[in-house]
Amino acid sequence: MSRPDDARALRSRKALQGALLALIEEKPFEQVSIREITSRAGVSYPVFFRRYETKEQLLEDIATDEVRCLLSLTGPMFEVGTGDQALQALCQHINDHRALWARLLTGGAAPAMREEFRRIAKEIGETRERRNPWLPVELAASFIVSGLFEILAWWMRQPADYPVENIVTIIDTLIVRSTARPVDVQLVDMPASN
């Protein structure tokens, strides 16, 4: 059995991911078989099971990579002067991969996606300069992720021609403006416990 990090195993992983992505562009995830995935990927059937137990695990692997990619695009969204272009790039990325994102955000993978969004956003949030230090990182990450997730999931339920520009405006108004601009807030100190 090959190690999961050797070059051949990585090529097989990418081929399986690419095959599943191509297949879900053609038909619903539920109708895709593992045999179809391996055939499209150009790998043998047993190779699939060296890495994954189910096609759902393959989808989760893709989801993790996509969430990391998506959240890396969100960083500049909160920077002065680059926010509009970054937000447009983020929304365009999702629109370009709409079939995948519709499955990830509105299908059976949605709970895992939400948790992966939250985990990675918290990880990213802990390494960035905080504009509002009074706002706990966990709360900010949860608020941003939940809002972004709900907006994107709503978008994926709209007709495919729903304007990307509208989503950019909605995310900018509801999430970016409310979290990216510094706000001078003084929270009440916790009372001393006896």
Image: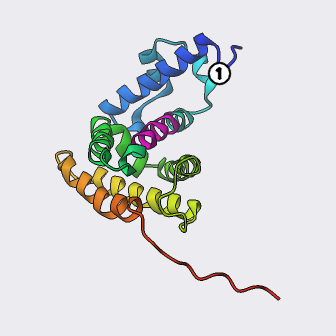
Q: What is the quadrant of the N terminus in the image? A: top right
Above or below: residue 90 compared with residue 5: below
Above or below: residue 67 compared with residue 181: above
Q: What is the quadrant of the C terminus in the image? A: bottom right
Instruction: Between residue 45 and residue 162, name the one nearer to us.
Output: 162
| Residue 71 inside the magenta-drawn segment | yes
Q: Which residue is tagged 1?
A: 50
- Residue at (49, 47) in percent of width and height: 109
Q: Where are the magenta residues, as a range? A: 62-73
Q: Where is residue 188 in the image (x, y as percent from the top left)?
A: 59, 83
- Residue at (51, 12) in percent of width and height: 43
The image quarter containing residue 32 is top left
Instruction: Between residue 150 and residue 170, name the one nearer to us.
Output: 170
Q: Left or right: where does residue 94 sit relative to residue 134? A: left
- Residue at (42, 22) in percent of width and height: 19
Q: Position of residue 128 (x, y in %)?
A: 53, 48
